[in-house]
Image: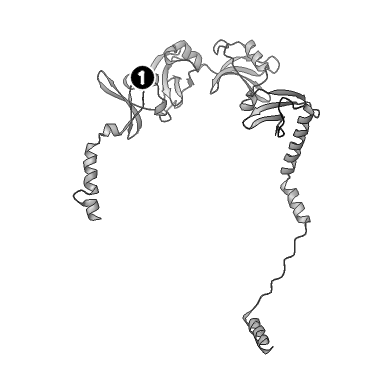
């Protein structure tokens, strides 16, 4: 072992030789293609390094930003913020506070005012999808920072109607007695110029359901269920066509074609599926009651055999 670790060609000698051949800068570099700057790992986390006229410039990557997701535009913002400070678009026309264009964990955003002990969380708004950093002007930043913006009140409920920008894009919201009612803006709607009348039109539309089922188009519409009038449709699923009625999904019978299935046959298939669900969903209380009504099987009594009884049995057998 001593020769293996400390010998003339031992492990310690080999490590020292290899260590002198390692370039620390290259060892801390993350190889990412199509980036104008190098991404390195430092004592305080990942950072970017680029060559400027005055020499190399480094800038920390925001804590929650994946280095592989950086694009050239974001890199330029980070480097510019490091050398020149935050991009100041101008002053707010009403408050006189500075408005900055910054890059955060979730992309570029505009900020009203400076971060300080008295104002640890200044107002911020992300850029809308499709808006590049070069397109942001002072007027646009002021409009973004005014969100959510009051459009007016609902003529029937008197509740406030606002337009805002969220994680799923621009929206209008109605604050009614039963809570907030949201609708997304259409592609043709403008976040900054939408009117109260247009917001009322959007709110009058049925709310779109999120998820794959809501987007799926029925292969066939069989008609209304005779029991409740709800539609009975056939959809194409990952395991083939299936029948859907309300919250019940049922596979087509084996050998049955979706094109030939009738409403009556579909209702029978759904009836069988719903009865199966009910039997599986029996309550634990009912199961315990049934178990208590079933007489328990009597176990045969075990006869304990002691050493004395074994000796007595052996004595009787010898006498016999």
In percent of width and height, residue 13 lies at 21, 46
- Closer-to-camera residue (135/147): 135
Q: Is residue 78 left or right of residue 151?
A: left
Residue that numbered label 1 is attached to? 76
Observer able to see residue 16? yes
- Give residue 80's quadrant in the image: top left
- Give residue 207's quadrant in the image: top right
Say what secondary structure mark 1 lies in. Answer: helix
Task: Identify the image quadrant of the C terminus.
Answer: bottom right
Image position of 125 with respect to 11: above or below: above
Image position of 88 with respect to 63: above or below: above
User: What residue is rendered at 48% in x and 12% in y?
Assistant: 140
Task: Identify the image quadrant of the N terminus.
Answer: bottom left
| Numbered disc total | 1
In percent of width and height, residue 269 lies at 75, 34
User: What residue is rendered at 69% in x and 14% in y?
Assistant: 155
- Closer-to-camera residue (130/254): 254
In percent of width and height, residue 185 lies at 59, 16
Observer able to see residue 281? no
Image position of 133 with respect to 240: above or below: above
User: What residue is rendered at 21% in x and 41% in y?
Assistant: 17
Q: Residue furthest front?
A: 255
């Amino acid at each position: 072992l001593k020769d293996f670790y400390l010998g003339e060609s031992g492990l310690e000698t080999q490590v020292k030789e290899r260590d002198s051949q390692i370039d620390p800068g290259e060892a801390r570099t993350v190889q990412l293609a199509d980036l104008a700057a190098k991404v390195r790992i430092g004592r305080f986390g990942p950072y970017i390094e680029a060559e400027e006229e005055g020499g190399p410039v480094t800038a920390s990557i925001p804590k929650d930003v994946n280095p592989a997701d950086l694009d050239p535009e974001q890199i330029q913002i980070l480097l510019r913020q490091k050398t020149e400070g935050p991009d100041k678009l101008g002053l707010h026309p009403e408050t006189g506070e500075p408005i900055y264009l910054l890059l955060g964990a979730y992309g570029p955003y505009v900020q009203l005012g400076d971060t300080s002990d008295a104002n640890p969380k200044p107002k911020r708004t992300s850029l809308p999808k499709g808006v590049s950093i070069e397109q942001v002007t002072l007027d646009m930043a002021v409009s973004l920072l005014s969100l959510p913006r009051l459009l007016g009140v609902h003529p029937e409920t008197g509740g406030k109607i606002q337009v805002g920008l969220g994680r799923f894009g621009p929206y209008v919201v109605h604050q009614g007695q039963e809570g907030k009612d949201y609708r997304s803006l259409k592609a043709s709607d403008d976040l900054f110029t939408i009117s109260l009348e247009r917001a009322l039109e959007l709110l009058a539309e049925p709310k779109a359901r999120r998820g794959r089922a809501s987007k799926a188009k029925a292969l066939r519409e069989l008609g209304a269920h005779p029991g409740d009038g709800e539609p009975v449709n056939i959809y194409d699923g990952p395991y083939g066509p299936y029948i859907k009625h309300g919250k019940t999904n049922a596979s087509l019978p084996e050998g049955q074609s979706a094109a030939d299935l009738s409403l009556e046959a579909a209702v029978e298939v759904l009836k069988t599926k719903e009865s199966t669900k009910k039997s599986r969903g029996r309550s634990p209380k009912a199961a315990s009651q049934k178990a208590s009504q079933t007489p328990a099987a009597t176990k045969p009594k075990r006869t304990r055999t002691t050493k004395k009884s074994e000796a007595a049995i052996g004595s009787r057998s010898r006498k016999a």
